Amino acid sequence: MCGIIGIASNKPVSINIINSLKKLEYRGYDSAGLATLTDDSINEKKCSGRVEELEKILFKAPSNGNIGIGHVRWATHGVPNIINAHPHSSEQVSVVHNGIIENSDEIKRELVSKGLKFKSQTDTEVITLLITEALKENEPLKSVYKTLKKLKGSFALGIIFKNFSNIIIGARRGSPLAVGYSKEENYIGSDSYALKSMTNKISYLDDGELCVLTKDQINFYDENLKKVNKKIHTMSESETAIDKGEYKHFMLKEIYEQPITIKNCISEYVDSLKKNINIINFPIEPNNINKIVLVGCGTAYNSCLTAKYWFEELTTIDVEIDIASEFRYRKLKFNSKNLYIFVSQSGETADTAAALDLCKKNNVKTCSIVNVIESTIARNSDWVLPIHAGTEIGVASTKAFLGQLTVLYILCLKLAIVRKDIDERTYVKNINNLKKLPEAIKECINIESNVQLMAKEFLSAKGSMFLGRGSSFPIALEGALKLKELSYLHAEGYPAGEMKHGPLALIEEGLPVIILAPKDKYFEKTLSNMQEVIARGGKILFITDNKKDSLNENIRFGLRVPHLDNLLSPILLTLPLQLLAYHVALLKNCDVDKPRNLAKSVTVE
Ligand code: F6R
């Protein structure tokens, strides 16, 4: 999703803006631009495509100026081209914007009727023109404030002014905005990662807040323009040091990190000596929980769906799951005895954040399972369970998914024992198995060379299917999601038992069909569903944890993952599917870390 950077300094800023934009590339984007203030004029440079293009433009015609803003754009209003790329500038003001202005058409009509002209198709340009108009009678902060009052929707903004050449104004409603402090420079950025190479001192704007930066001062204001103070967070070294190391892509690095991230996560929650789970301060007394409602988007939704099987298996709590963009508009019957859990890697996903807000408005208890603990969703929920996965840069989520599953599983075990839904022996056995998980994950990753061979089966395919039953069904969905987002190959995930109700029509000679068949209560049934696919010419790629050889001549390719217990099989089945998506994407020359049309932090609805 779009990314913002702004720097107020005592030296030229364009090179550092480019470097920060490169850090924001992981969010997914299609065009880039920057504006600096030189000799009292706004100097704007933009390109469609990659930040490297912008760098080449700057190399040919350098931009001076000690103050500037930059942006990577993920198109929402108007096609991705140079004109629609940000910043959007008038003679007086230049604006970068994340988010969506929902009433932009209405404002545009009003401004056009007054004789103003628009250059782009974007919603952002209305902000530029509104501020320009307001500046005729007001100083910059008042002009921005008056403009914000007219806007509906969500945004984070960075703004510079031709006639006030020492300030940048930042503002936030909905979309996040971080502020960074340094000795002779100050910054705004759409996340702390963009600022990491320049500072480890960060504050976050809260919803409705504004900030005014100069090179040596930052002032914060609330939505009524009253001055406010902000806490400064010092990021640790591990938070600031992020690179690909020996790996070709962040995604591969993050897949390989999973034995460690899962080990860290388990040790944060599990007391090995006492064989107990350290989860306390439940917002609702566990015995009084009537229902758990799990909400997320994309991969995070798939982790919710997996957890539903665990909660049903191990606890007596009723579980409901929902996709956040649906949840937020449903006519729900809120219940104060329900615990509403929001799962989000970034903690900034607009739909998930809105679903959480809806719960808060209805006075029910909320919990968030996030990777970014300073995020909006974490800050707004009653209770936070971090996944401790470390920064995830690859746009397609891998280690965060496994982290979400691990935390959900741990939460489920804790609730089950506190409510006496399981006995102590089962609890300790499950904790012991959980502790073996990092090693088993390592073993799964070791089969990478076999997965690489399997990936070749997808090269000439027109589509693919992923099938599983029980808790393997959400993993089939996740496998299909990873493959489609990375390699742009059509992929469908289905419950294997559902195939005969229509989807079998899609099976034709040679179509790759991944069968997820752990040795659980569904195993034989899954094999029967596989026969239905074989009978129609599907090319079977079989993944199991069954120690006995279940492979036969009808199976094109088989992979075996380790077996711990049936509850943990969805976690282990995920690894080959992550590697498969990675290798198919590589074979098809796709940009693994920055797949098209996918953003790391989806801050628009
Ligand atoms: C898939 C992917 C997306 C995200 C979804 C939710 O690989 O990255 O489907 O899972 O956009 O994002 P978060 O978890 O940040 O709320």
Image (cartoon, rainbow, N blue to C red):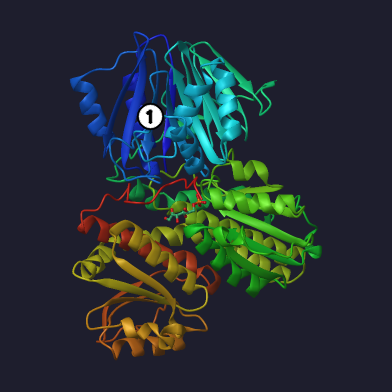
Judge: label 1 CB < 8 Å from ligand 1.
no
**Picture residue at 22% right of the left edge, 66% below the top:** 453
**Picture residue at 68% right of the left edge, 53% below the top:** 358
Q: In the shown orientation, is residue 359 left or right of residue 268? A: right
Taking depth in this image into account, of 80 and 292 the one nearest to the observer is: 80
**Picture residue at 69% right of the left edge, 64% below the top:** 332
Q: In the shown orientation, is residue 396 left or right of residue 218? A: left
Q: Is residue 511 above or below residue 37?
A: below
Does residue 124 appear anywhere in the picture?
Answer: yes
Mark 1 secondary-structure assignment = loop
Q: Position of residue 53 (x, y in %)?
A: 23, 33
Q: Position of residue 428 (x, y in %)?
A: 66, 65
Q: Is residue 400 above or below residue 538?
A: above
Image-quadrant location for residue 424: bottom right
Q: Position of residue 228 (x, y in %)?
A: 68, 22
What type is the residue that disc 1 sits on? Pro
- Identify residue for label 1: 87
**Picture residue at 28% right of the left edge, 40% below the top:** 81
Image-quadrant location for residue 66: top left
Image quadrant in which the N terminus is located = top left
Taking depth in this image into account, of 274 and 185 the one nearest to the observer is: 185
Q: Is residue 306 above or below residue 59?
A: below
